[in-house]
Image (cartoon, rainbow, N blue to C red):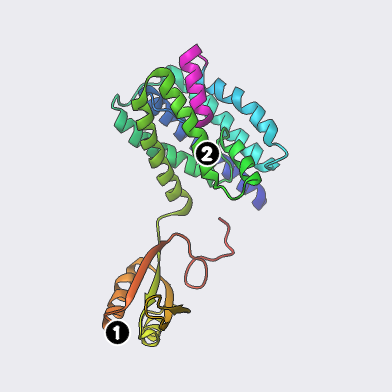
Amino acid sequence: MDGKNHNTLWDVFKILAGAAITSCSFRYLTFPNHIVSGGVTGISQILNNLIGTPVGLGIITINVPLFLWAWKRLGRRFVLLTGFCMLSQSLLIDLLEPIARAITDEPMLAAVYGGVLNGLGYGIIFTTGATSGGTDIPSRILRRKYPHINLSTFIMGLNMVVILTYAVLFKRFDSCMYTLICMYIVSKVESLILYGPINSRLCYIISDRSEDLRSAITQRLGRGATLLHGQGAWSGQEKQVILCVVKPPQLARLRKLVREIDENAFLVVSDARSVYGHGFENILQED
């Protein structure tokens, strides 16, 4: 089996795993507690409550025209994998209905644990480059037309329309609130799955003894550094700003170095989610 086929089979397995996790979360946690999924799944929930249409069948029906629209616009591989994900998830949602029982009748617990499971499932799916379909498709197409707007802004906007519609139609504004909690947790878990935990710190050091600090960072800490040109806005004095990236365990040592050399230095530390280059991740590796 060549590498391409192996990768495709692995992606199919991950999609099935992600679809199973999200479907179980839907049937056993969120749906029984009236937590809206947003997007096409949320529309299907509304139709299910209004006319009794099976949720999975509703998802497939609404997605068909979206996939036809996306076929030439978003690429064959994306559409095929996303279509497979959508069908798997929809079928599992309907197949689980006869045996579905709410694990808890406490909406907050359902929102929290449903958010964790949905984030885990969708995060696994997204690592393949596919999505679950629905609002992701028009959002991606609109993103190409309006590249200055973030993709998540489109998705959030469409999801909010569905959530508010559900709340108004069925007078369940508490469901809307629980849904927002669930969506927040989903986004955090997805980010953790896709990008991993914060594993580096980006540091800026402003000091009158920048040369001594640079030497200490490179020789005693074993990290590279870059000198940037700076100028004090208040004093107008020329300064060199040191930029360096360190691993979390090295941050305490860096603070100690700065304190020893110049206790009046200005140290700014922020999270760096991904760092590529010598001593960190290989920029040539596949995502």
Q: Which mark is residue 155?
A: 2
Q: Residues within 10 Å of mark 1 (few under 14, many from 20)?
A: some
Residue ID for mark 1: 261
On the question of residue 95 being in view, the answer is: no
x, y (%) of residue 260? Answer: 26, 83
Q: Amino acid at mark 2?
A: Ile
Taking the spot 57% from the left edge, 45% from the top edge, the residue there is 128
Residue 45 image position (x, y, % from top left): 47, 22
Mark 1 is on which residue type? Ile
In whole angstroms, how far apart are the C-alphas of marks 1 and 2?
49 Å
Nearest to the observer: residue 112 or residue 166: 166
Residue at 49% x, 30% y is 161
Q: Secondary structure at mark 1?
A: helix
- Image-based side of 49 in relation to 255, left or right: right
Q: Is residue 266 left or right of residue 7?
A: left
Earlier along the polypeptide chain: callout 1 or callout 2?
2
| Image coords of residue 202 (percent x, y) | 41, 68
As drawn, the label of residue 149 is none
Up/down of 200 relative to 165, above or below: below
The secondary structure making up most of the magenta span is: helix
Which stretch is magenta?
39-53
**SS state under label 2:** helix
